[in-house]
């Protein structure tokens, strides 16, 4: 094992989501840099779309963190499931992608918007933003009304994301957009090109923070 391993854990069992994350993280890999490994939580649901789904992966995530040695961990689900219990399972830093994505957006823009997968996700997002004191910087949170699996797919998903992104930018006043599902990773770059504002993939944001923590050592 590399002494500078970052383990990125897809909290659902959809391998297509893991593959999309791995592809999005390719620019972060370099000779001599931290090793970035992507893992799929086999015990997880195919998509994390409810509070029950979130609760169901908390302990499996903590067990995976406890048995897989790494210098830093990233919980790659926008619900940040099991973040605190995973931090108790290791002395290494553990990053949640939602928190990292929001903090990155606030570092790049005054107000940010979130593209959610479903309307029922938004209430959880708002609660989390209040907890970290970021609610005052939220311009809007709008849903695709898709499943996690659909959000990880092709052209139809991108067209819907573009429409929602334009509404967040033009009607809500968002200066940056945060992707509210790790399954959206492969759409980040073309969406940023079309919208002309920063589009934050939360997994990339969390890995960037993890790299900083590892390299600072």
Image (tube, rainbow, N blue to C red):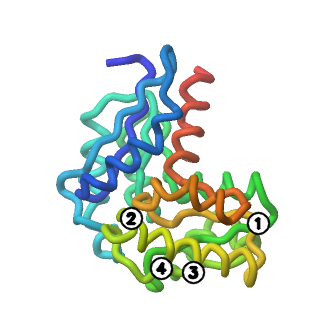
Gap between marks 1 and 3 measured at Cα: 15 Å
**Quarter-wise, where is residue 13 in the image?**
bottom left
> Residue at the spot x=50%, y=14% of the render?
32
Query: Is disc 3 placed on a helix, strand or loop?
Result: strand
Q: Which residue is mark 4?
A: 144
Gap between marks 1 and 4 measured at Cα: 19 Å
Residues 6 and 116: in front is: 116
Q: Earlier in the sequence, mark 1 or mark 4?
A: 4
Residues 99 and 171: in front is: 171
Q: Nearer the viewer, mark 1 or mark 2?
A: 2
Mark 4–mark 2 CB contact (< 8 Å): no
Gap between marks 4 and 2 measured at Cα: 14 Å
Gap between marks 1 and 2 measured at Cα: 25 Å
Mark 1–mark 3 CB contact (< 8 Å): no
Q: Nearer the viewer, mark 2 or mark 3?
A: 2
Query: Is disc 4 placed on a helix, strand or loop?
Result: loop
- Residue count near mark 1 (Cα–Cα under 10 Å), binned few <14, some 14–19, many ≥20: many
């Amino acid at each position: 094992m590399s002494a500078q391993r970052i383990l990125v854990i897809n909290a659902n069992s959809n391998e297509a989501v893991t593959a999309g994350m791995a592809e999005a993280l390719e620019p972060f890999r370099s000779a001599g840099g931290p090793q970035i490994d992507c893992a799929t939580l086999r015990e997880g649901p195919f998509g994390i779309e409810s509070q029950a789904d979130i609760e169901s992966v908390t302990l499996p995530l903590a067990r995976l963190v406890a048995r897989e040695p790494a210098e830093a961990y990233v919980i790659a689900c926008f619900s940040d499931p099991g973040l605190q219990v995973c931090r108790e399972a290791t002395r290494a830093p553990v990053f949640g992608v939602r928190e990292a994505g929001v903090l990155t957006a606030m570092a790049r823009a005054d107000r940010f918007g979130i593209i959610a997968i479903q309307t029922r996700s938004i209430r959880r997002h708002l609660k989390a933003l209040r907890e970290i004191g970021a609610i005052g910087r939220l311009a809007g949170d709008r849903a695709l009304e898709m499943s996690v699996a659909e959000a990880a797919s092709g052209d139809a998903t991108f067209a819907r994301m573009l429409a929602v992104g334009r509404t967040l930018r033009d009607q809500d006043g968002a200066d940056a957009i945060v992707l509210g599902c790790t399954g959206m990773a492969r759409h980040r770059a073309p969406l940023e090109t079309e919208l002309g504002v920063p589009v934050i993939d939360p997994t990339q944001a969390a890995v960037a923070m993890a790299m900083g923590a590892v390299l600072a050592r």
